[in-house]
């Protein structure tokens, strides 16, 4: 499986957002897209599954231009879990997840589909919610159910827009680690937008830092999460603590000379909570041309 993005640009009617983005991603892996608010991260992943069509440039999946792939066929290749806290489904959790088995297809519920749903609910630790009405769940539970719906689709490429933003710290870590494991187990390219630099750095095989509609940096977490990048793009003073070869970001307060962990994981990661069961290095994200 390979995604090749060749010089795509996109603008909404009033604003140019993406400018000549090129990128190639090979191999099963977890890739995080990071960058400040409004730089075009969601717009970019919308161009990878035809929610939006680039104004110029092409997106190829396994050498096929996605413009020539029907929405129904594309759904077999590319899954997408949007950032949305407002989804409502007048269905049970099981039926909501079941919809992911046949996106754009006929509504079915075969035993094999139900088994897949059950597996994914167990994987995400929400099997106890199976019969609960979706609309009665909490925001974090909603987010896990929507993630389950994306996973049960078993796409080759899964696009996730801030999939852990409503989860508590323990579940953010668990789910992100699980996504990395799943990329290997299911042979998937998982592309996740994240604002949590520490968790993203810890579990991503590669990271993409976006700025003003372009890719600013791409590569391994320690290549992307650098003090100079954070100062330039986020305008923050930071210190990078190398934790077993992976960066951890500590904010520095220029006035008070105090340091603040960027997120709780700075503490957690140096403790014993994280117990990685799979440790594989991924590779294969390559910036083809810089914008
Ligand atoms: N439907 C739309 N119509 C017009 N402009 C839009 C639309 N959606 C997004 N934009 C604009 O496009 C730019 C990029 O938005 P996008 O949602 O891709 O950013 P983002 O990097 O994902 O931001 P965030 O981190 O806040 O989610 C922003 O300036 C936004 O205002």
Image: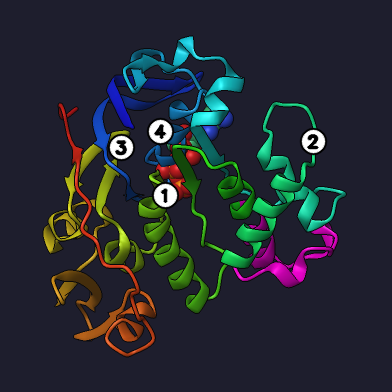
- The x, y position of residue 245, in whole percent, is 13, 71
Q: Mark 1 and mark 4 in contact? Answer it, CB < 8 Å.
A: no
How far apart marks 4 and 3 lie (CA) works out to 12 Å
Q: Which residue is mark 2?
A: 108
- The x, y position of residue 270, in whole percent, is 27, 86
The circle on residue 192 is 1
Is 219 left or right of 270, judged from the image as shown?
left
Q: Could you tell me what secondary structure mostly forms the magenta stretch?
A: helix
Q: Which residues are magenta?
A: 124-146
Q: Which residue is mark 3?
A: 212
How far apart marks 1 and 4 lie (CA) works out to 11 Å
* Mark found first going from the N terminus, 2 or 3: 2
* Mark found first going from the N terminus, 1 or 3: 1
Q: Which residue is mark 4?
A: 44
Residue 285 shown in magenta:
no
How far apart marks 2 and 3 lie (CA) works out to 43 Å
Which numbered disc, 1 or 4, marks the residue closer to the eye? 1
* Mark found first going from the N terminus, 4 or 2: 4
């Amino acid at each position: 499986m390979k995604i090749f993005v060749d010089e795509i640009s996109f603008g909404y009617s009033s604003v140019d957002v993406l400018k000549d983005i090129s990128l190639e991603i090979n191999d099963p892996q977890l890739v995080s897209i990071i960058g400040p608010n409004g730089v075009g991260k969601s717009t970019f992943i919308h161009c990878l599954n035809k929610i939006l069509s680039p104004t110029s440039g092409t997106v190829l999946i396994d050498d096929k231009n996605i413009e020539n792939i029907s929405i129904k066929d594309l759904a077999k290749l590319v899954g997408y879990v949007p950032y949305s806290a407002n989804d409502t489904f007048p269905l049970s959790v099981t039926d909501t997840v079941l919809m992911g088995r046949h996106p754009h297809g006929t509504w079915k519920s075969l035993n094999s589909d139900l088994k897949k749903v059950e597996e994914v609910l167990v994987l995400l630790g929400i099997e106890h919610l199976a019969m609960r009405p979706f609309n009665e769940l909490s925001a974090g539970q909603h987010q896990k159910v929507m993630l389950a719906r994306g996973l049960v689709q078993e796409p080759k490429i899964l696009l996730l827009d801030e999939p852990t933003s409503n989860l508590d710290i323990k579940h953010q870590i668990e789910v992100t680690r699980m996504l990395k494991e799943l990329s290997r187990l299911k042979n998937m390219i998982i592309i996740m937008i994240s604002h949590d630099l520490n968790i993203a750095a810890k579990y991503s095989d590669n990271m993409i830092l976006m700025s003003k509609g372009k890719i600013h940096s791409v590569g391994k977490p320690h290549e992307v999460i650098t003090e100079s990048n954070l100062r330039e793009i986020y305008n923050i003073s930071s210190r990078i603590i190398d934790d077993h070869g992976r960066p951890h970001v500590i904010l520095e307060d220029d006035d008070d000379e105090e340091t603040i962990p960027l997120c709780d994981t700075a503490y957690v990661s140096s403790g014993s909570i994280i117990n990685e069961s799979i440790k594989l290095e991924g590779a294969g994200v390559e910036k083809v041309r810089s914008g």
